[in-house]
Image: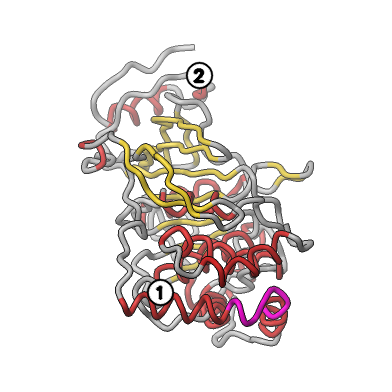
Amino acid sequence: MSNVKRGNVAASMMKGVEETRSENIHQKKPPKGTGRPLGKKAAKKADTEIEPTVDDNGETKNKKKKRTGVKVAQGKNAITPEVDAAIEEFVTYAAKLGLEGVRKEFGDLKAYTPPNFNFNAFTANEARNRYKDVVCVDSTRVTLTLNVPPEPDYIHANWVKMDKVEKTFIAAQGPLDNTISDFWRMIHQEGVTTILMLCKVEEGGKVKCSQYWPVENGTFQTYGCMLVNNKKVEKEDHLDIITLEVLPEGCSNSTITKLIQVGDWPDKGVPKSGMSVLRLLKLISPGGPCVVHCSAGIGRTGTVIAIETMIQRIFKAQPTNMKDVVMQLRNQRASSIQTEGQYCFAYLCVLYYISAKTKKYNDQMRAFQEEYHKSDLC
């Protein structure tokens, strides 16, 4: 087996792939590409900082954290009088509802039917859908243009643009073997900077998502017309952070994206700790859309987007209601948030975030947190 020599441009990498297309490229070391630099601002500092955090009992404490080289989107939000009023409104509402009230609120959402509920492209691309009963609505679907034709323009993914939220999301199903190329075409086409993978490739003996990236650091793989280069692998508790370079065949301009895989979130369930999700949200890179996917791309995926939306709205002193957020979310990604456990968990995570920012409302929040942790939801 011949080796691919190291070079300084992505075009050289493509040439090497062309020469060795029929061989097992997993064992080859790729050259460095010429894609957009990763984390220029973050690279300037590698010091540590003290930031408030909160444990799963709602107690606030200081924790020394090493900077991760990505911007903390919510971490610099100030507690102005307007923000404090928004916090008080949400905390008071959650405390008044209690866990049973939140469960009932989720039950009320079952009667909601989104407008413009058409899914013709989904129906026409049956082989590219993971689940027959999880539709991709036409009004917000991501339309592929890269290498179309001969490739199709369809992928089971929807744009999610929430009011008063800076970050744009793409909610997607976990790639199938025959849609991996489509997935990477989307990543490059839309300049995606972060991919949140909220599932494992296999869960409970069932395949939930195809292995769609090269696993080992320093290796690359081709998927149809797309080349993916694994540049770096980092591991944290329950998280794998993989830096990937993506480019189409014959193209020297690449996209650098971070794939963050969560290992402790069960299908149709919730993680044991809300703090792990808040940590995940901190790792979202600034600029470019963020792709979020699990297996179907609605349960775990919808929960994360709802949590981020609630946090951003509250800390921008905007009117905030979880039920309204989920309705807006479902207008764009059908069936988002599958279970009452996920819905209650979203409330819990927002309360944890608030208690990490201010101790003022800890007593009001504690009853809800304790009720949740004593329930059958966790």
Tag 2 and tag 1, C-beta contact below 8 Å: no
**Pointer 2: what residue?**
27
Q: In the picture provided, is 287 more to the left or to the right than 308?
A: left
Q: Which one is in front, 314 or 134?
A: 314
> In front of the other: label 2 or label 1?
1
Q: Which mark is residue 111?
A: none
**Residue 160: x, y in percent?**
46, 70
Q: Residues within 10 Å of mark 1 (few under 14, many from 20)?
A: many
Secondary structure that dominates the magenta span: helix
Q: Is residue 97 magenta?
A: yes
Determine whether the residue tagged by mark 1 lies in a helix, strand or loop: helix
Amino acid type indicated by mark 1: Arg
Which stretch is magenta? Answer: 94-101
Residue at 50% in and 67% down: 158
- Which residue sits at x=40%, y=28%? 18
Residue 66 image offset from top left, x and y in percent: 37, 37
Task: Assign the C terminus to one quadrant of the image.
Answer: bottom right
Is 186 colored magenta in this rendering?
Answer: no
Give x and y (percent) for residue 340.
Answer: 71, 70
Q: How is the image coloured?
A: secondary structure
Please give left or right for residue 317 compared with residue 8 in the image. Answer: right
What residue is disc 1 on?
313
Give the mark nearer the N terminus: 2 vs 1.
Answer: 2
Look at the image and tell me whether residue 121 can be seen.
no
Relative to 276, is 324 above or below? below
Classify 10 Å Cα crowding around label 2: few (below 14), some (14-19), many (20 and above): some
